[in-house]
Image (cartoon, grey):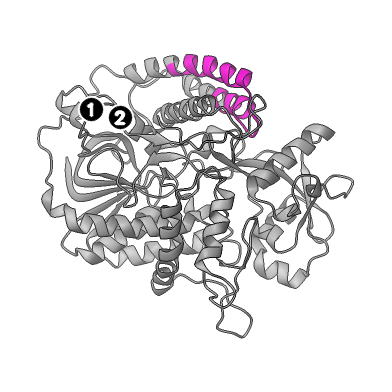
Amino acid sequence: MKKVDILVLGSGVAGLSFAIRMAQKQPQTSIAVLSKTISSESNTSYAQGGVAAVWDDQKDSYQKHIEDTLDAGDGLCDEEIVRIVVEEGPSRVRELIDWGTRFDKEKQEEQYDLGREGGHSENRILHYKDITGREIQRALLAKAKELPNIEVLEHHFAIDLLTQHHLGRWVTRLSPNIECYGCYSLNLKTNRAERILAKATVMASGGAGQVYKSTTNPTIATGDGMAMTYRAKGRVRNMEFVQFHPTALYNPAGENPVFLVSEAVRGFGGILKDAEGQEFMQKYDPRKSLAPRDIVARAIDQEMKNSGSDCMYLDCRHLDQEAFLAHFPNIYEKCKSIGIDPFEQMIPVVPACHYFCGGIETDAWGQTSIHRLYACGECTSTGLHGANRLASNSLLEGLVFADRIAKDLDQKLAEWDWKEGIPAWEATGSQDPKELVLITQSMKELKEIMSSYVGIVRSNLRLERAFSRLRLLYEETEELYNKSRISPALCELRNLITVAYLVTRSAAIRRESRGLHFTTDYPNRQEYLDDTRL
């Protein structure tokens, strides 16, 4: 058994920036950051475009950024949260820079080279080439290593949150004052399940893109935090809003994750076209290739269905080659590696699952519906994104809420203590599954179900099909889980089935088309605004 003051589940921008801020506020406080692989592997590392923040006061303003966010969110944003994130964001980004993060600057100038992406009315994206997330991750890990009270535990897989349920209490979604006391974690080095007790727990576990067959998310993005919180009877919100990035690189050979062709390429001047070289976005939105992601993704999906094509194309042949190489060296090299020269050929692109706008419901200070459990980053539903995330707002949200959680915890942590009486993990009678195909095949089935029935376009019939198949997968997997020795593969399958249920159930509840949720049975928006809570 391990005891720490604060347990952080996840080592991306949200988890690490919280740990750094908390460690600086309370140097005597012990903080453990769990990573189920290595600490540098996170959704943050895969962020290409950058972080949005009002930087140029002469051209930009908080109000413009707020309006862009509200517009993208299609009516479901919490305006108070949007204002908090936009107004506090630039200070959080300056802290990142102070901690050693590099962003691109104009040639021979001290001014930052601000990019622009779909849905933004001004250039306000700070970026580092096309690997912004990797650069932020590098700087945060380096900073965390300087602080002796932060311990990063690699290869530790969080299994379940500890609550009164583990003390023998009957806990339901209606139970008042559910509390979190830490988690059970599988130490992958010893292959033993351990108790980690904490006075406060911060969930920063990232997204769940692996629930779909095609995703830009790394293989670790299996919705663990969302599923654990839901199992612990915590509240989740708006899980139907899954953002598909319009322009993942189409590779007939297949890749997991698929390679992301950043939205910044369209902001830079790339134009979406069909196989004949004809533009088509003007049919769907006056902003053409710079329309918000949900509109672009549906347009590409529709054009592919209309023509029977496997992909659409992004034309960059007319762009300045030197500037393109300076901004997007990794995109260029990746295209070249599969035989495509972006200066001579159009880049083949398809939509892919990219970001979860729904998740664990939190308040303005990152507190969840479970006492002593906070959450920040992609695993949450804070109210910022509404029905559709504005490009490059995600890193900003993680930074702002990490800071707000640290400020809130700074006032409360002294009031709490460790909970005694939590039993050790019970593994008696369990054994290794005799056939791993039971797990791998179920994972393939799950991805096919979600991609076919609960993807970019939905319908009542598709959702009913998904429900009936998910129910069978759930029953089979629970039976296997109850008699098998714990393993990451089995836990991830179980978590993704939970996420799939939450997405499908939420989609069935919402009888309208709004933002990222489009259903052929209810193609119009309702006049009223409502969140989906489960």
Given the current orientation, which residue lies at the most extreme front position? 527
**518 lies above or below 15:** above
Tell me the kind of residue under disc 2: Lys
Tell me the kind of residue under disc 1: Ser
* Quarter occupied by residue 469: top right
* Quarter occupied by residue 160: top left
Q: Residues within 10 Å of mark 2 (few under 14, many from 20)?
A: many
Residue carrying label 1: 175
Magenta span main SS: helix
Residue 297 part of the magenta-drawn span: no
Which SS class for mark 2? Answer: loop
Q: Nearer the viewer, residue 187 or 374?
A: 374
Which SS class for mark 1? Answer: loop
Range of the magenta residues?
A: 445-474
Q: Residues within 10 Å of mark 1 (few under 14, many from 20)?
A: few
- Residue 95's spot in the image, x, y percent? 39, 70
**495 lies above or below 16:** above
Badge number at residue 233:
2
